[in-house]
Amino acid sequence: MELVIVESPAKAKTIENFLGKGYTVKSSYGHVRDLPKKENSIDIENGFEPKYEVLQDKKKVIKELKDLTKKADRVWLATDEDREGEAISWHLAEVLKLNKENSKRIVFHEITKSAILSAIQNPRDIDVNLVNAQQARRILDRLVGFELSPVLWRKVKPSLSAGRVQSVSVRIIVEREREIQAFKSEDYFKLSAIFQLESGEKLKAEYPSKIDNKSDLLKILEDVKSGDFKVLNVETKPTKRNPSAPFTTSTLQQEASRKLGFSVSQTMGVAQKLYESGKITYMRTDSVNLSDTAIAAAKNEIVKSYGAEYSKSRQYSTKSKGAQEAHEAIRPTYFNNHTTDGPSQEQKLYDLIWKRTVASQMAEAQLEKTTIDLNNGKVDIVAQGEVLKFEGFLKVYNESKDEEDEEEKVDGLLPPITKGETLLLNSFLATQKFTHHPARYTEASLVKKLEQLGIGRPSTYAPTITTIQKRGYIEKGDREGVERKYTVVSFEGNDQKEEIKTENTGAEKKKLFPTDIGIVVNDFLVENFDKVLDYNFTADVEKQFDDIAEGKNTWNSMLKEFYTPFKKDVNEALEHSEKATGERLLGQHPKTGLNIYARIGRYGAMVQMGETDSEDKPKFASLKAPLTIATVTIEEALKLFQLPKSLGTFEELEVSVGVGRFGPYVKYDKMFVSIPKGQDPLELELNEAIELIKKKKEVDANRLIKQFDEDKNLQILNGRYGPYIKFGKSNVRIPKDKEPKDLEYQEVLEIIEAQDKKKKK
């Protein structure tokens, strides 16, 4: 019997179908060993030697694999082809005590029968350099986390944590937020005009520059109206558009975000399923390379589906900093499968990958761009048009743009026109516009930035972005826009008029915002650990991991070079740095003269009235989004100190409104009712609060199926997933053959006891 070990059960199932009899394929369910969570477990004095332990939930898996290895004639370690996969194979070899004679490492970048059989024909030993590169990253990140976190507990707030790449990612977002806050919007005017040709057709043209102010605009408008326009020049020239390269991990994450609205971790989860079921090649790669076989298969499919004129084979070269390993780009395994079955997310992502890969091997789009220069002796105006002559790759795929990359759209086909022709001004429209601050990052555009800076690698983008959100340093959210007035000047048939219109501006969707605690932690780390948070230094560390992977450097010496100055900075920060609260003095209370501050407290961002060390205790109020320490005004702070406030009584009990750790609420007796998002607690009236209380009572009444006189803590409730038993802090499932409302007290106790026995077993 030959034993093949992979890291996921889905992958095991797919491979088992290809190998057939004589092979047993088993999964390790990911990593089997790691550094213990609760201790540093790195012997710094002894060359940074790590102490690994088998993960608690993998002990049963390891026992099963050990039993199988004793019976197996040969063991094939078939984990993923990157550093992480190499490390899993190494840990398995160590834990299972495999020897080189009867165990081999095999790698493949696609799960197809030919790729698996080819890998078995070409086995190799575990690449210790790749393992050491992964080990160096794991140890370095553990050291940074273990050393920095206690500094943050003492100097900022308990239970905080820091990470090497995560903290740099937070810095990028904080710096962008500061740019936005410092940005001063300027207005300008854009002018477009409609002309009538001698043929009777109409031509739209634009004033080629921004017009800085209204007085300049009015002068230009008078000049525009002062005489007929002549066609000075008509230039038509062919242009081409080339297709984008096939997907890397980073570009797939960006495009799936723009086109499908997927989060970075969602994209990776769906791509993993497609890979494990043999539909696409390995999804962690920074290479845009395609194999000769793939290029030939794509060509065959393009010629068959669209015609020979649509085919143009190309090879792309990787430009990203420190691209590692000679992987392929992400592509379909079988090009003749234009679509796939399965869940809709998998279908959508597969469609995107198929189209992008096929388009990369198609002919350029042929366009014709026409520019017409007009002048009336005083003003130059330009008309531009673009016509698609041959769609080429655009027949299949067109790449989306980020906000900051959006280009002005060029009009399509222009009417026939000749040099020297005279045009009549039909109408014009001048619209006031405003410069916009730099765009906030989305998950995808943050990945793009990290890749540009050379920070992180394909396997780290998704976990990094998930971690900074889980830690509460960054929030992904929407912001409603605000109304803004703008001026429009129009002219038609000798009638010029000026109107003031309104528009909604500044609305944000799925953008990354730094939280107050994220900003305070970032500022503290930048001040005290500037090297660790330096972009170039972080990118250089990645380069050093690459050197270890290529055998050009040893992992111990690299760690020592990093750790010695880092430990010195840690000791310095613990001894000499000030406590960081992000404190900002907003002003004084108009009646009492007490100072009012915005700062970080034990439970997050807050405003404080009075001094911490004075005899009279200061007053505190929580700050909730969209208010932040950096932006809250003294007027907003004074309003917050009005809470909690009494609204009156309902059924002889007091009704009050306040703001707590989880947002604004109405308090009624012992009941707390959340105030809906967007409703200002200070504006809440008693009758509105009573409505909220009644709704909550109704929900609670529908929730309770049964309560027992023998024990008031024992209830049968209706939950999101159906009826269940609530006993103190425990929730217990009700067996399917039991009717919840008919259950007796003793019967319920028996169900709880049976559940407890099951848990203990």
Image (cartoon, rainbow, N blue to C red):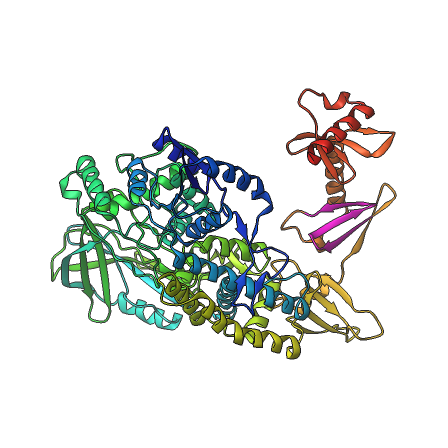
- Per the rendered image, the range of residues in magenta is 655-675
x then y, percent, for residue 338: 29, 35
Using the rendered view, name the quadrant where residue 208 is placed.
bottom left
Above or below 400: residue 380: below
x then y, percent, for residue 411: 26, 53
Residues 417 and 195: in front is 417
Q: Residue furthest left?
A: 419
In the rendered structure, the answer to whether residue 282 lies left or right of residue 673 reads left
Q: Quadrant of the C terminus?
A: top right
Above or below 539: residue 265: above
In the rendered structure, the answer to whether residue 520 lies left or right of residue 558 reads right
Using the rendered view, name the quadrant where residue 401 is placed.
bottom left
Residues 45 and 193: in front is 45
x then y, percent, for residue 721: 64, 32
Q: Main secondary structure of the magenta part?
A: strand
In the rendered structure, the answer to whether residue 33 lies left or right of residue 84 reads right
Let me know if residue 281 appears in the view. Answer: yes
